[in-house]
Image (cartoon, grey):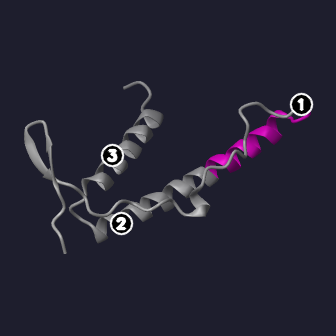
Amino acid sequence: MTTPPLIKYRGKLYRRATKQLTAPPPELKQEVDAPLLPGPHETAPEYYKRLRAGVERELQKLHQLIQRYHTEQARDPKNWGHVGDLGHIYMKLRELNHPEE
């Protein structure tokens, strides 16, 4: 097995990751299932119900993605890419849950 090449970043040498996260599985592909505006004959309760279902689906997909990152991190614990991806998800969730900060 060959050693991954070193990369110089901000004056320090880092080893390049040897394995990249594979493409997301088909069930995690983004779907456009809840447009930003309601249909012309859709009532507020109908639209709310449809949006709520869309939010629930997206939360389930997010949970699957986090589980997938956990599995990938366990396979390659020295890869900081997984840490960065999870950190990005965390910061986006913080923005949603704490808009005043």
- Residue drawn at x 37%, y 39% as measured from the top left: 91
Task: Tell me the CA gap for discs 2 and 3.
Answer: 15 Å
* 42 is within the stretch colored magenta: yes
Q: Do the residues labelled 1 and 2 touch (CB within 8 Å)?
A: no
- Which residues make up the magenta segment? 40-56
Graded by Cα atoms within 10 Å as few (under 14), some (14 to 19) or many (20 or more), the crowding at tag 3 reads few
Q: What type is the residue that disc 2 sits on?
A: Glu
Q: What type is the residue that disc 3 sits on?
A: Gly
Q: Describe the element under mark 2 as helix, strand or loop.
A: helix
- Residue drawn at x 36%, y 26% as measured from the top left: 101
Q: Describe the element under mark 3 as helix, strand or loop.
A: helix
Q: In this view, does 76 lie above or below 100?
A: below
Label at residue 40: 1
Q: For mark 2, what is the residue?
A: 72
Q: In which quarter of the image is the N terminus?
A: bottom left
Q: Position of residue 97 (x, y in %)?
A: 45, 37
Q: In this view, does 5 lie above or below 11?
A: below
- Residue drawn at x 17%, y 57% as measured from the top left: 5
Q: What type is the residue that disc 1 sits on?
A: Pro
Q: Quadrant of residue 95?
A: top left
Q: In this view, does 89 lie to the left or right of 42?
A: left
- Residue drawn at x 19%, y 61% as measured from the top left: 4
Residue in the foreground of this view, choosing between 90 and 71: 71
Instruction: Tell me which numbered mark, 1 or 2, is placed earlier along the sequence.
Output: 1
Q: Where is residue 51 in the image (x, y as percent from the top left)?
A: 71, 42
Instruction: Tell me which numbered mark, 2 or 3, is placed earlier along the sequence.
Output: 2
